[in-house]
Amino acid sequence: MGTVVDQAKKSEVNGKSLAEKNVTVVFVLGGPGSGKGTQCTNIVETFGFTHLSAGDLLRAEIKSGSENGTMIQNMIKEGKIVPSEVTIKLLQKAMLEDANNKFLIDGFPRNEENRAAFELVTGISPAFVLFFDCPEAEMERRLLGRNQGREDDNIDTIRKRFKVFLESSLPVIEYYDSLGKVRKINAAKPVDEVFEDVKSVFTTI
Ligand code: UDP
Ligand code: MG
């Protein structure tokens, strides 16, 4: 087995490894601007999950002045996918440090390599995948209107993110769909209407 995998499997916080913690993970996927973050906030309030946004963890890593910061910043600006090793380490650490054992992982895995590496390194397969399906024009409108000061919410980067989503992230959703694990939500509606549909998914776990 490769050293990266060995090392990651051994990674511990306070003497505990992720394998010893019995965690439930739901992957929350969908294109940029499909409403993943907004709906995760609602799910946390109603169903007691901890929300882990891979993008937020990466942005915090840039801010912390980590040695990977500049590389991560450049990839995000280009809409590219950060190497699995970096993102998985951040997710593992966040899951270990939190007392909860129910996690929403938002915006990850973004490609097949992310997915396979996560499953191999953590030994975790998701309970299911919540997929927010939204037309590109609507996602573009939301991203351009949200003004969160994000360096990647400009039209050039948005186009690149859409392309990466179609080419790299949709295959992940198709993979889990082939296992019967995808719960698809029509995300083109107002927030509270979308949440009604989300609620019915979580109440039938
Ligand atoms: N990103 C990444 N790996 C991840 C999650 C995010 O490389 O697992 C990077 C990628 O460059 C992406 C950006 O972070 O375009 C923003 O991701 P986020 O999920 O915050 O935003 P979204 O595009 O889903 O609105
Ligand atoms: Mg987000």
Image: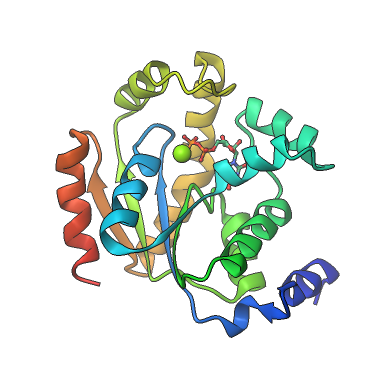
Residue 204 location (% of width, % of height): 19, 70
Foreground residue among 80 and 47: 47
Is residue 47 in sight in this rendering? yes
Is residue 81 in sight in this rendering? no
**Quadrant where the C terminus is found in the figure:** bottom left
Residue 142 location (% of width, % of height): 35, 23
Left/right of residue 134 with respect to residue 73 in the rendered view: left
Residue at left offset 35%, top offset 36%: 34
Reply above or below: 177 against 197.
below
Query: Where is residue 173, by image quadrant?
Result: bottom left
Reply above or below: 60 against 163.
below
Residue at left offset 48%, top offset 54%: 172
Reply above or below: 183 against 165.
below
Residue at left offset 17%, top offset 40%: 192
**Quadrant where the N terminus is found in the figure:** bottom right
Foreground residue among 79 and 46: 46
Colour style of the rendered protein structure: rainbow
Reply above or below: 128 against 186.
below
Residue 80 location (% of width, % of height): 64, 35
Tally of numbered discs: 0
Left/right of residue 151 with respect to residue 84 in the rendered view: left
Query: Where is residue 21, by image quadrant?
Result: bottom right
Residue 33 location (% of width, % of height): 39, 32
Left/right of residue 91 with respect to residue 103 in the rendered view: right
Residue at left offset 60%, top offset 60%: 94
Farthest residue toward the bottom? 20
